Structures are given as structure tokens and as C-alpha cells.
């Protein structure tokens, strides 16, 4: 995978994460806080790794 692929993948995952959190909030599902925290950590880690990969020369 190249740099643009990682960036597009992370953008898509971030958008999906936002939609899932919004749906859980609208549906008033229990455990929203746990899902938000775990998902936020996963997305943040993904963006951090994307930054490392994007800095790597081709």
C-alpha cells in the first residue's frame, strides 16, 4: 500500500466510527461510552501509524 491508500483508509474508518457513535447515541444503546473510548483509541492509533507511514520516503 502507498501513502494515499493509508490516508484514504483512515479517513473512511474515521467516518464509519463517527456514524456508528451517532447511531448508538440516537438509539440510546447502553455502553456508548465504552464503545466511544475503545473506538477513539483505535482510530487515534491508526492516524498515528498513518503519520509514521506517510513520513517514510518511497
Image (cartoon, rainbow, N blue to C red):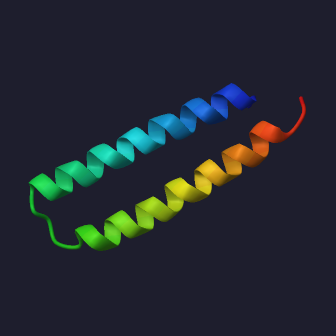
Q: Position of residue 29 (x, y in %)?
A: 14, 65
Left or right: where does residue 51 sit relative to residue 29? right
At horizontal 75% and vertical 28% (from top left) the residue drawn is 2
Residue found at the very far right of the displayed protein? 57
Q: Position of residue 17 (x, y in %)?
A: 37, 48
Left or right: where does residue 8 sit relative to residue 55? left
At horizontal 56% and vertical 35% (from top left) the residue drawn is 9
At horizontal 24% and vertical 67% (from top left) the residue drawn is 32
Residue found at the very far left of the displayed protein? 27
Q: Is residue 35 above or below residue 6?
A: below
**How many numbered dots are placed on residues in this image?**
0
At horizontal 65% and vertical 29% (from top left) the residue drawn is 5
Q: Is residue 23 above or below residue 39?
A: above
Q: Quadrant of residue 58?
A: top right
Q: Position of residue 8 (x, y in %)?
A: 56, 30
Q: Quadrant of the N terminus?
A: top right
Q: Position of residue 30 (x, y in %)?
A: 16, 72
Q: Quadrant of residue 55?
A: top right
Q: Is residue 44 above or below residue 6?
A: below
Q: Is residue 20 above or below residue 32?
A: above
Amino acid at each position: 500500500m502507498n501513502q494515499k491508500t493509508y490516508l484514504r483508509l483512515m479517513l473512511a474508518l474515521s467516518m464509519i466510527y463517527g456514524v456508528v457513535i451517532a447511531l448508538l447515541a440516537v438509539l440510546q444503546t447502553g455502553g456508548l461510552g465504552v464503545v466511544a473510548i475503545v473506538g477513539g483509541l483505535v482510530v487515534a492509533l491508526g492516524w498515528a501509524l498513518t503519520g509514521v507511514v506517510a513520513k517514510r520516503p518511497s
